Amino acid sequence: MKEPFQPITPEVLTIDQWQQLNSLLVAGFTTKIGGFSERPFTGLNLGLHVHDKIDHVHQNRRRIGEILDFPLSTWVCADQVHDAKIVKVESKDIGKGVYDYENSIESTDGFYTLERGCLLTSCYADCVPLFFFAPKHNVIGLAHAGWKGTVKKIAENMIKTLQKNEHIDSTDILVAIGPSIQNCCYTVDDIVIQAVRNMGLGGEHYYYQTSPGQYQLNLARLNKDVLLKSGVIEENILTTSYCTSCAEQLFFSHRRDKGTTGRMMSFIGIREA
Ligand SMILES: [Zn+2]
């Protein structure tokens, strides 16, 4: 498969196949290149909650707003808590969490919207970013799936919510699995592996043991199989080949950078015509 996330500038990768379906759509993921942040956040840190200088984060966010042609007043940011709840974003939510983390949408890792001219965003430094687009309905969504969100099946919750509340068939939903830490670099313990086994997907396909109590886990593949079980068509799922830990020149990595690092941002929005 061709890499679905392609650079439009050094700072921004976008899902160009989706933009071919709707020229008003913008969806993708930022890199750590450029930006104003200083060590240990050097580059384009977009997370407000990591104790970087807030002015630098605002400058970095403004830069991305300019590249995407979505000013900060159109962004929506959430307080991510590694849970699996899905929230519908409405016009009253636009602008939340852009300048001030306390003002983010409360405790939300997955959200979607029918609004135009609104950019959904969430922050990452290894977790799996999931992107959702229903082109017939012009509905867009994002979900943040670390190991906890993955085993709680946030991907399935999004598909079920779009089916139930918005009457969108799962076969009409496109999904992209974005840059995250891959099994080459993602070592987990028995607690995580037990949670994976409890998902009922037949765990062994997703990890291999490297030493007693240590495993390499493939979170992207787990999320893909949750999506397939939820009725998403395989041809409608794009999966990146980027590993955030391996691609040191491109991405921050919470694991590789020993817990103190910046955040990339996933984004999706449909411009007003
Ligand atoms: Zn890797």
Image (spheres, grey):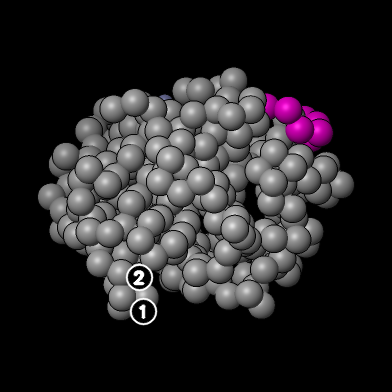
Q: How many marks?
A: 2
Q: Position of 58 compared to 261: left or right?
A: right
Residue at mark 2: 162
| Residue at left offset 63%, top offset 75% | 91
Of the four image quadrants, the one with ligand 1 is top left
Q: As displayed, is residue 36 above or below residue 225?
A: above
Q: Position of 61 compared to 5: left or right?
A: right
Q: Which mark is residue 165?
A: 1
Q: Amino acid at mark 1?
A: Asn
Q: Answer whether residue 36 is magenta in the image.
A: yes
Residues in magenta, as a range:
32-40
Q: Position of residue 177 (x, y in %)?
A: 38, 43
Q: Position of 146 compared to 8: left or right?
A: left
| 92 vs 80, nearest the viewer | 92
Q: Within 8 Å of ligand 1, the CB of disc 2? A: no
**Residue ranking furthest to the left:** 202
Q: Does the image show residue 175?
A: yes
Q: Quadrant of residue 161?
A: bottom left
**Residue ranking furthest to the right:** 55
Q: Residues within 10 Å of mark 2 (few under 14, many from 20)?
A: many
Q: Which mark is residue 110?
A: none
| Residue at left offset 48%, top offset 66% | 112
